[in-house]
Image: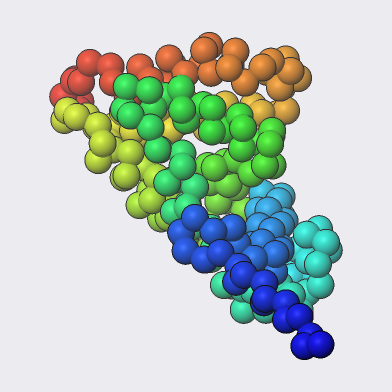
Amino acid sequence: MNPVSTPPPPPPPSGPGASPAPGRRDAEATKAAILRAARYFLARHAHADITLKAVAERAGVSAPLVLKYFGNKDALFARVMSFEEDAETFLDAPLEDLGRHMVRQILTGQRERGADPVLRIAFAPLHGDHGDVLRANFRAQVLDRLAARLPGPDAAVRAELALATALGLSMMLGIARGPELRSLPVEDVVDRYGPTVQAHLTGPARPVGT
């Protein structure tokens, strides 16, 4: 009797709709954990005092794995000091709803991911020359990008005011850890605070200096 042949298993799906392979998912999760750990230390210690060993321990990985994914300490913190990826999400809403969206992103970032999209700019003074990099990135990737979306001669001023208002919320949640604010449902805070941010974004324009 001829042996019955078993057809080979179908190949794993590929293309835009396919799920990433387990190894890739694990790698992305590990990178994300390392970046969260690096952000944690960047918000609490001067750049010069942060070690890759400390970052690795907080992320639950080995220091060689940090080097594998990011190359060296400067490359890792160059990634952490960039706002490019966060700005994509933080500013991704129609202008008429952007204030509420920004507030929601701050709240869900801190509560669900432990990663506020903009709070690390508040720690620029800790980092010497690296603080200048952080400021330059914030201006180019967040502030200027927001200002470019706003009409009127005072667009840059209104962008700074809107971000100052948003950062006040970030600091009360993440640094002062205000207990009343932290206990409220996300949408309650969005309803209360979103209009305050929105007023700077779409309120009446006025010439600068008047």
Q: Quadrant of residue 30?
A: bottom right
> x and y percent of residue 207 in the render?
16, 24
**Quadrant in which residue 22 is drawn:** bottom right
Res 199 quadrant in image: top left
Could you tell whether 26 is left or right of 196 in the image?
A: right
Does 137 sit above or below residue 201? below
Q: Residue at x 81, y 87 (%)?
A: 1
Question: Vertically, is 1 above or below 37?
Answer: below
At horizontal 47% and vertical 18% (from top left) the residue drawn is: 194
Where residue 4 appears, x then y in whole percent?
76, 80
What residue is rendered at 25% in x and 40% in y? 148
Taking the spot 19% from the left edge, 29% from the top edge, the residue there is 151
Q: Nearer the viewer, residue 144 or 18?
A: 18
In front of the other: 32 or 156: 32
On screen, residue 208 versus residue 65, left or right, reads left
State which quarter of the image contains the C terminus: top left
Instruction: Name the spot of residue 49 as percent of width and height, x first.
Output: 73, 65
Q: In this image, 113 relative to 145: left or right?
A: right
In the foreground, 138 or 56: 56
Q: Position of residue 66 (x, y in %)?
A: 71, 72
Q: Nearer the viewer, residue 141 or 49?
A: 141
